[in-house]
Image: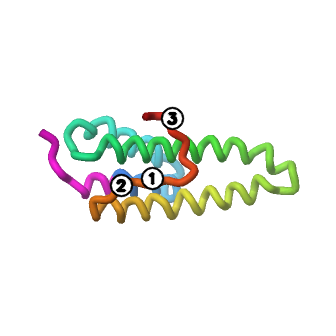
Amino acid sequence: MQKENNGILVATHLSQLLDFVTGFGGFIVPLVIWLTQKDEIHKMDEHGKSVINFQLSMLVYCILCIPLILFFGLGLLGFLVIAIFAAVFPVYNAIKASNGGQPYYPMSISFIK
């Protein structure tokens, strides 16, 4: 039987912000939380997949921005947009998770279904 624990769901979403604080961990910590808790916490599998898909999508977009720097600096603008998305949507989804809502990450590619 899975238990309801919105606090762990919120922590999973907010742990993505470790990239801004420590420079790393924004992918590893949510991955570990998801893999260890997906069978124990209600809705963790759905939220964890959303977080991991979002992190992988942001990585792909960052890689795509690198060659775009050569084209009038469009890659720099891309990095700025990615940074804003990476800061805003984990907080937005943490608030939704605390209220029992479904996660929503725009421009997220479904790597894990």
Q: Give the left or right position of residue 40, taking residue 13 as reference.
A: left
Q: Are marks 3 and 1 in contact (CB under 8 Å)?
A: no
Occupied quadrant, residue 95? bottom left
| Residue located beneath label 1 in the image | 16
| Disc 3/disc 1 C-alpha distance (Å) | 17 Å
- Quadrant containing the C terminus is top left
What amino acid type is highlighted by mark number 2? Gln
Which residue is the site of mark 3? 111
Q: 20 above or below 58?
A: below
Q: CA distance from mark 2 to mark 3?
A: 18 Å
* Residue 85 horizontal/vertical position (percent): 56, 59
Residue tagged 2:
102
Q: Which residues are the magenta region? A: 1-11
Q: Is residue 77 magenta?
A: no
- For badge 3, the amino acid type reads Phe
Residue 28 spot, x, y in % from top left:
43, 41
Horizontal side of residue 6 vs 1, given as left or right: right
Q: Is residue 1 left or right of residue 5?
A: left
Query: Callout 3: few (<14), some (14-19), or many (20+) C-alpha neighbours within 10 Å?
Result: few
Question: What secondary structure is marked by label 3?
Answer: loop
